[in-house]
Every structure is written in C-alpha cells, then in structure tokens.
Image (tube, helix red, strand yellow):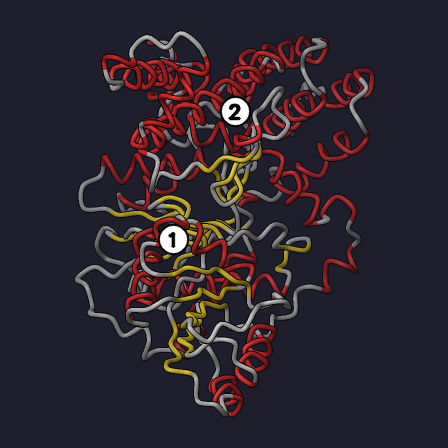
C-alpha cells in the first residue's frame, strides 16, 4: 500500500497510452498539485511532455502538432471548460482522464461537444488526493467542519478523495468510526454509499482478511498538533511550512535568489529520503557528512578551491555535481534556518515544557514552568499561547486549575487578543467534554507500569517523549483490542482476524508526528500495512486556523443546527 506509487502509476499510464509524439499535459488547480507531488517537471519532459497548461488559462495558443493529455477533477466547472475546449480544439487529439467517477450525463455532454472527433479516450484514473509520503495522503482541505458538523461541500470532496484512495489501492474495506464524533459517522456512511452505488468498481479480488478503514476525528487529540517537532520533515513543516513539498524561504535573512523557494521530496532527494524521520541532532551530523562526501568526490586537481570563483567554476564544469551541490546548499540553508529559529525563539526550553504538559501529571511543576516561560522575553506570543493551550487541555478539570491567572499573564505579556481567544476555542474544539477518550491518564496497569519504568530509566530524549493518541489506537486495533463500543463497525459484520491492511483517516487533519508513528508501526509490525490520511496535514498554525474555521468559540445553538443537513453529491 504505497500512495505515491499508486498516483505515479496512473500518470505513467496516461502518458504511455497516448503513444509516441509531443504532448501537452492539461490540468486544473488541484490536479497540478497531485501530479507535482509524484513527478518532477524534468522527469515528465523525458516522456515527451513538453508543455504544462491549466484548463482555465484563457490565453493558450493553438498547437495542432501536440497531443493533449487532460487530467482533471470531474467538477462541473472542469466539464464546462472541456466542452468549450472541444468545440474549438487547440490540439490535434485529446486523451481525457478524470481523477474520480464522472457521471454519464457529463460524458454525454462531452461527446456532443466533440463535433470534430478529436477525443481518443475518456477514462477514470483515481488519483484524487495528494500523495505526501508513501504511507501518508492529504486532501489539502482546511476548515472541513462548521461547528461539529461537516461543511457539505467539504464532505462531498472528502468522500470523493477517500473513495478514490480506496480504488487506487484496490481496497473494498470494512469501516469503523469514532463513535464520539458525528462527523466521523457521517463520512463513514457517505463512503459506504459510494461503495454500494459503484459496487462494480469495488469488485476486487477478496483477501482472506478484509481491509479496514478507520475514521477518526481530530477533536479527540488536540494535543499532537500543538507540539513543537524535532524530526526533520515534521520540524520543517512546524517552523517553515511545507506546501505540496515546497518550502518558502524568502523570509530567511540574506537568502540567495535561487533558494527563495526549495522543494523537499523524498522521491528525488536521497538525503531527504534518508533523513526525514530522524531527530534534529542527527541531521546536523549527517549534513556534515554530506558536505565531506561532496568534498571527497571532487577531482584531485580541484581539491583546493581558493576563492568563490574557483568554486563556481568547479560546479559549472562538472554537471554531475550540480545536483549534489543543489542538495547540499538546500539542506544547509534549511537546517541553518531551523537552528536560527530554535535559538531565537528559545524552542528547546519551550519544547521541554510542552512535553511535560503532554506526558507528565505534575500540576504544580507544569504551572511553575509555564509561568516562568511566559515571563521570558524570548518566548514569542505564539509559543506563549500554545503553552497555555496545552495547560488548559491537560488541567481543564484539575482542582487547582490556574487558567485565569495564566490568561492574565498572557495579557500582561502583550499577547494579542486573537491568540488569547484561541485558548478557549481550543478547549471548545478538543476539551474533555468533546473527547471520546482519555488523553492523559494511563488506562490500565500495564500502561501505568510502562510509564513508571520510563520515568525510572529517564527519557533518552526529553523533546520526543510524546506519542500521539493514534499510536495507542492503532496498537489496540492491531491486537484486536480496540473497543467496539467506542469504535463501532458500520453495518452488521465485524472483523474476526487481526487486520492486515489498515487505512486511517483523520477528519480535521493529520500531522507529521502521526505519520512518523505509522511509518514506525509499518517497520516493526510484520504482516500489517497502514496508510494514514487526513483532510490536511497540520502544523500548529494551520491547526489553529482549523479551530478558528470551525467557529466553535462563537457559535450559538441555532447556528450549529444549520449544517447538519446531508451533503448533496452528484
């Protein structure tokens, strides 16, 4: 179950099926992102695709010597654009691929528009999601719910994305969902409806143990997306932001023009592929090794580089080093900026207290440490508010809860009203009243013993003590211990055997920390394959935007009723 491979295969097949000759790839805004995650432009150029265009671009030239490969989402808007295109074709022949199920009436409209008979093929290729890592996918949807209920448009898009994922992996799963979440039940029902309606598409060879789709809600664990991260991929997203593998470095002091935006993709960057799941401390020494390796690979006569001009000449004269030099300069820049931010924002100290808030149960120590950091001028308003949110979530019902005092400290520190309001919004979003699980206290004797032993031997790394709640959920699921009264099956049948192929989907967004959990479970659990997806992949900033978008902090009883009607689906 590799989502990058699944999408890549679809795109290779499109290009192969169109035969030899020069081609243009015609996409929409979303499919452009889908393709760019699995193929670089240079890789596609090698397959005779010389032009990349958007279907909604008004000023495309007529180029009758090119074949057109159209890869589009089956939206009304795209169908209308295609109808216009086919009435006045700009290319010699059209191969049309929709990223999801297209209605018969839309196909009929396209056939009627194709008066010049330029369409060679219309097919459905189910690459309707963003393949982030081999075991991680996203739909790039921010703000999927209004209050506790789905935004109907986003429910429809999420249903399409999730059913496309199942089709691309050739899985017809049993479905379990988080009972405490109305949104999880709703999505489970919508996915089931599509599987029932399009049953012919889902007729795959039956496996001995059926695959399992588990639908969860971000509300159940609002802690994980609030924590600072210390593994490479997660840390880059937390501090710099990753958007479809692109990182904006334009704000880095003294950045050179060619490094203002860089791409970090494990598909074609070996250093990143080998280091994305490692801790920051290891990355530093690996970068040093990378640079030494780079030095060694230079021809002997070039070993002494006296000046910048010598270096420039060296890189230009030896093209095979260009890629390596690009990799070196890119990672040195990214890691350098991460280091600068860690030091400037005092993140080692901040993160240590965050981990204490997430993993320990010592209220007075936690309170003291949060208060101390709120007095520290190097701690930004963003990090100060985040600490208070973590405190509020953990000690919400503690007899000595000191949230009002901490809110006062935030005000005195000059933290803006926007962040102060977000503290109560986060509790409303993922507080004790909402959660179907107990995030903080170990559930049984085994867990308590584990925690005690962990405390005895000291933690190898105080910055990575936290494990997402997803780890416990999946551990129970794999062992057949996940309680059916908390995570019921949709429909009458249940899974008797331990599951082998598991697709987990988190409404409200997954995180790279959870993706790392899945990566590690895949490595250490023979016979089990897990893929994780979410409406988006969050860092703290985007998670707080998600909370704001849900509008929970300012909703009245009447407005929360409005969005519960079912979403219409074409």
Q: Which mark is residue 484?
A: 1
Left or right: residue 492 versus residue 333 is: left
Q: Secondary structure at mark 2?
A: helix
Quarter holding residue 121: bottom left
Q: Is residue 486 visible?
A: no
Looking at the picture, how far across and down is residue 17, in whole percent? 29, 71
Of 526 and 59, nearer the camera is: 59
33 over 260 or under it: above or below: below
Q: Residue 366's x, y, as percent?
A: 59, 14
User: Distance between the Cα atoms at labels 1 and 2?
Assistant: 27 Å
**Label 2 crowd (10 A; few <14 / some 14-19 / many >=20):** many
What x and y, as percent, mark residue 461?
40, 14
Location of residue 252 by image quarter: top right
Instruction: Examine the rendered structure and indicate whether residue 493 appears above or below residue 409.
Output: below
**Quarter of the figure with residue 146:** bottom right
Of badges 1 and 2, nearer the viewer stands 2
Residue at point 56%, 37% (across, down): 222
On the question of residue 311 being in view, the answer is yes
Q: In the picture shown, does residue 275 fall above or below 216?
A: above
443 is higher (above) or lower (below) than 555:
above
Label at residue 82: none
- Along the horizontal axis of the image, is 191 left or right of 141? left
Residue 365 at x, y = what percent?
A: 59, 10
Residue bearing mark 2: 358
Mark 1 element type: loop
Q: Pick the quarter of the image with the C terminus.
A: bottom right
């Amino acid at each position: 179950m590799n989502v990058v491979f699944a999408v890549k295969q679809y795109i290779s097949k499109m290009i192969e099926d169109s035969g030899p000759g020069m081609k243009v790839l015609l996409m929409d805004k979303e499919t452009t992102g889908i393709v760019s995650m699995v193929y670089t432009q240079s890789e596609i150029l090698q397959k005779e695709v010389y032009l990349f265009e958007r279907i909604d671009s008004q000023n495309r030239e007529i180029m009758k010597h090119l074949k057109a490969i159209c890869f589009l989402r089956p939206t009304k808007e795209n169908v209308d654009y295609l109808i216009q295109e086919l009435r006045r074709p700009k290319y010699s022949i059209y191969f049309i691929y929709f990223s999801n199920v297209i209605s018969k009436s839309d196909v009929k409209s396209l056939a009627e528009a194709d008066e010049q008979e330029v369409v060679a093929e219309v097919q459905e290729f189910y690459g309707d999601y963003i393949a982030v890592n081999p075991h991680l996918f996203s739909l790039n949807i921010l703000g999927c719910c209004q209050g506790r209920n789905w935004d109907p448009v986003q429910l429809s898009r999420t249903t399409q994305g999730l059913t496309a994922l199942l089709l691309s992996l050739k899985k017809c799963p049993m479905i379990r969902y988080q009972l405490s979440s109305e949104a999880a039940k709703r999505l489970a029902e919508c996915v089931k409806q599509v599987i029932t309606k399009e049953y012919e598409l889902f007729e795959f060879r039956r496996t001995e143990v059926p695959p399992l789709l588990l639908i969860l809600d971000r509300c159940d664990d609002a802690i994980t997306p609030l924590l600072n991260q210390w593994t490479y991929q997660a840390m880059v997203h937390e501090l710099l932001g990753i958007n479809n593998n692109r990182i904006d470095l334009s704000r880095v002091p003294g950045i050179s023009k060619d490094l203002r935006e860089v791409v970090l993709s494990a598909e074609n960057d070996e250093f990143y592929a080998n280091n994305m799941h490692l801790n920051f401390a290891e990355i530093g020494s690996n970068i040093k090794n990378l640079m030494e390796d780079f030095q060694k690979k230079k021809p002997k006569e070039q070993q002494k580089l006296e000046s910048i001009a010598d270096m420039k000449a060296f890189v230009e004269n030896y093209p095979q080093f260009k890629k390596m030099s690009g990799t070196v300069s890119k990672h040195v820049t990214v890691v350098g900026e991460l280091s600068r931010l860690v030091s400037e924002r005092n993140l080692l100290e901040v993160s240590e207290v965050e981990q204490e808030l997430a993993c320990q149960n010592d209220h007075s120590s936690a309170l003291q440490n949060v208060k101390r950091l709120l007095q520290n001028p190097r701690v930004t308003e963003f990090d100060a508010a985040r600490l208070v949110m973590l405190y509020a979530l953990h000690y919400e019902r503690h007899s000595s809860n000191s949230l009002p005092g901490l809110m006062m400290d935030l005000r005195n520190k000059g933290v803006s009203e926007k962040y102060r309001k977000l503290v109560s919004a986060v509790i409303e979003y993922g507080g004790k009243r909402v959660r179907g699980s107990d995030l903080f206290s170990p559930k049984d004797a085994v867990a308590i013993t584990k925690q005690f032993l962990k405390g005895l031997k000291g933690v190898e790394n105080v910055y990575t003590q936290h494990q997402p709640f997803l780890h416990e959920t999946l551990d129970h699921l794999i062992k057949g211990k996940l309680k059916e009264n908390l995570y019921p099956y949709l429909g009458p049948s249940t899974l008797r055997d331990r599951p082998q192929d598991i697709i987990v989907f988190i409404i409200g967004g997954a995180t790279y920390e959870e993706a790392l959990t899945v990566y590690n479970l895949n490595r250490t659990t023979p016979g089990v394959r897990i893929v994780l997806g979410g409406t988006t992949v969050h860092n703290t900033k985007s998670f707080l935007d998600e909370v704001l978008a849900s509008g929970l902090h300012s909703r009245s009883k009447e407005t929360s009723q409005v969005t519960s009607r079912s979403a219409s689906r074409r």
